[in-house]
Amino acid sequence: MGSYYLWLKGLHIAFMVTWFAGLFYLPRLFIYHAPALDAPSRERFGTMEYRLFVIMTLGAGLTALFGIGMLLVNPALLGQGWFQLKLLAVAGLAVYHYRCYRWIVVLRSAAASQDTRWLRWFNEIPVIFLLGGVLLAVLKPSFGS
């Protein structure tokens, strides 16, 4: 595989950290944005959310790009159960990422809301994906073999 694979893996991990930083912080901004009553605060949160979303989308794209690069160097990964499960988790993260975008749109147009219970639960979802993805990549469990 050579050193190319290690460079791709290192960059993949670095941009995954960027992506997750956004996935952890953006929903927290939603929690603060939802009950905000004054226009300057609502606009400030909207701007912060949009800019963070752009940065985390770049992180997601580069994570995917370097992940695909690793697959091109080592296509045997696709035949491993742990990796297939990791890809399923990445698909779930993509859905979560999109839902973050939808919250940006909703909060931009909605009136203030005091109930942030759902957003507080939504904020915790990336932890599950992070733990699952990291543990799968480190432990590489075999399924049925």
Image (cartoon, helix red, strand yellow):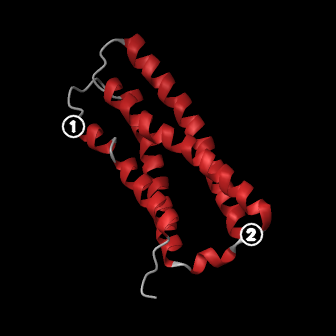
Q: Are marks 2 and 1 in contact (CB under 8 Å)?
A: no
**Residue drawn at 35 percent across, 49 percent down:** 125
- 60 to 143, vertically: above or below: above
> In the rendered image, which quarter is residue 72 located in?
bottom right
What's the residue type where badge 2 is placed? Val
Which-is-in-front pick, marks 2 and 1? Answer: 2
Given residues 122 and 5, the one toward you in this image is: 5
- Is 56 situated above or below 11? above
Which residue position holds label 2? 73
Residue 89, image x, y percentages: 45, 62
Q: Which of disc 1 and disc 2 is earlier in sequence?
A: 2
Residue 112 vertical placement versus 126 (above, below): above
Q: Is residue 97 left or right of residue 124?
A: right
> What residue is shown with label 1?
117
Dot 1: within a 10 Å radius of its alpha carbon, few (fewer than 14), some, or many (20 or more) residues?
Answer: few
Residue 31 image position (x, y, % from top left): 32, 30
Image coordinates for residue 93, horizontal then vertical, percent: 46, 54
Classify mark 1: helix, strand or loop.
helix
**Horizontal arrangement in the rendering, residue 31 relative to residue 67 (left or right):** left
Distance between mark 2 and mark 1 Cα atoms = 44 Å
* Of residues 115 and 75, the one drawn nearer to the viewer in this rendering: 75
Q: Residue at x 20, y 31 (%)?
A: 115
